[in-house]
Image: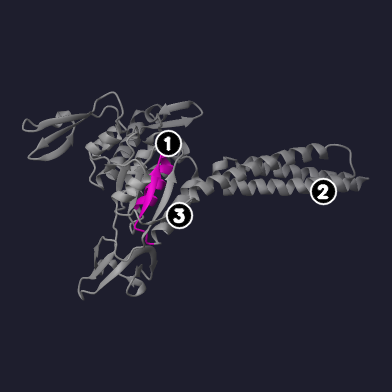
Amino acid sequence: MGLNKITKPSMRDFLVSITALACVSACFADTFTHHQTGEVLHGYATSRAQEGLALVQTQEKGPTKLNLAEWQITTDRQGRKNKVIVFNLDDEIELEIETAAFGKAIVAAADEGPLFILLEIDTPGGQKYLTNRLCGAIMETRNCPVIAFVKTGTYGGAISAGAAVALACDKIYMASATSIGAATTIVIDEKGIRDLKQAFGETIGEKFDSIWQAKLASLAEQNGRPGLLAKAMIDKDIEVIEVSEDGKRLFIEPINKKPQQKLVHTWSQKGSLLTLTAAEAVQCMMADKVAESREDVLRDLDAASAEIVVNKDMQDARAELKRADGQVNRIRTSIDLKMKESEGRMPTPKALKILREAELECKTLISLAKKYPDLEMEVRPLEEWLNTIKVESKEIKRQSKRR
C-alpha cells in the first residue's frame, strides 16, 4: 500500500501549500460575451496578464487584453485547438525537479489552447508537500480543463497522494483494474516510519491529519464529489454510509442518519482506510467513468480526432537528475584520487595543478548541490572539503618557498 510521506523539514511547505490551494477555483473560458456591449469573442484565456488584464487568444482579434470581470464566460470549444496534451505521472511523487517541471509545463500547455490536458496517473503516492504543489499547479490551470485518467501500470492506480492529484482534476476516468484511495500520512525520519501522532504528538498529529482531510475533502467537493469519502481515505475511524432522502443521494456518518433516510450502501467501515475500485469510485461519484485506455477517454470526450501531444518534461527532468547524480559520483571519485595523489612525493607544480583541478571540481559539486536539492547533498561539508583543498595548496606553496 502506498502512503503519503512527509518529513519534519517539509511541514512548513505542507501548511503553506494547503492554505494556498483553498483559495483556488476552476474557471474555463472559451466564449466571451461583454456584459454591456454584447460583443462576442471566441478563444481561450491564457495565464499571462498585462497591466492587470488577462491575455486572451481570440479568433476575432488575435491576442487581446480583457478584464474578465466585464465578460460573461461560457465554457465550450469554440476557438480552441483540436489538440490534447498528455502528461504522465507514472512513478512515486518524490522529486522536486519533476514537480517544478510539471508546474511550468502545465501552464505552458494550457496557454496553447488545447481541448483539454490529460493527466495519466499510476502512482503509489509520495511526498505530501510535493503533492500539494502538483495539485496547486493543476487547480491554477484555470484556463484549460485538466482530465485525470487513472491507468493500469506498475502501481495499480491513484494511491495515497495520487488520489489527491486525481481529485484536483476536473474529471476522473479509471481503468477497471485500478483503484483510488488509502491516502493516510506517514513520517520517515531517523527513527523510522511512523504516523503523524507518533512523530509529533497526539495534538499536533491530529491537527495535521485534520488539515489533510480538509484538503482532500475540498478537492473532492470542488467537482461535486463526496468530501466525506475523501476524508475516509485518510482516517480509518471514519464510517461513511450512503442514504437517500427525497430522491437525493447523501453520504454521511451513521450517527447522523435520520429515520426518514433510507440506507443505500455502507462505503467505509471503521478500522480500514477507504480504497475504491474503479467501478466503486464511479458508483459513489468519486470518479466519472470507467475507461480502459487513452483512446476510450478521448472518444468519450469527443476528442478522437484530436492531435495528441505527449509532454515529457517530467521524465526529462528525472533523466536530467540521473545525469547530475552520475556527474556527482564521477567528480567525487576524481577528487578522492587527486587528494591521494597529492599526498605522494612529486614536483610542486604538479601537486598544485592537481589541487587546482580538485578545487574546481569541488566548486562544481557545490553548484550541483544547490541546483539539485533532490541529490540531498549538504553544501557545508562540501565547502569544508573545498577549504581543506585550499589549505593544502597554501601549505605546499609555503613549503616550496622554504626550499
Whichever of labels 1 and 2 marks the residue nearer the N terminus, that label is 1
User: Which element type, helix, strand or loop, lies under badge 2?
Assistant: helix
Q: Quadrant of residue 81?
A: bottom left
Q: Nearer the viewer, residue 296 or 238?
A: 296
Position of residue 154 measured from the top left corner of the image (x, y, whole percent) = 44, 34
The residue depicted at 42 percent of the width and 36 percent of the height is: 153
Q: Which residue is mark 2?
A: 353
Horizontally, is 283 left or right of 336 in the view?
Answer: left
Position of residue 194 measured from the top left corner of the image (x, y, whole percent) = 42, 27
The residue depicted at 35 percent of the width and 35 percent of the height is: 178
Q: Which residue is mark 1?
A: 153
Position of residue 59 measured from the top left corner of the image (x, y, whole percent) = 33, 71
Q: Nearer the viewer, residue 60 or 82?
A: 82
Q: Nearer the viewer, residue 193 or 164?
A: 164
Magenta extent: 113-139
Label 2: how many Cα within 10 Å (few below 14, some 14–19, many 20+):
some
Whichever of labels 1 and 3 marks the residue nearer the N terminus, that label is 3
**Vertical relation: 76 (above or below) 132:** below
**Vertical relation: 78 (above or below) 383:** below
Q: Which residue is mark 3?
A: 105
**Vertical relation: 305 (above or below) 34:** above
- From this viewpoint, which residue is outermost toward the front? 305
Q: Quadrant of residue 143?
A: bottom left
**Vertical relation: 123 (above or below) 367:** above
Whether residue 270 is in magenta: the answer is no
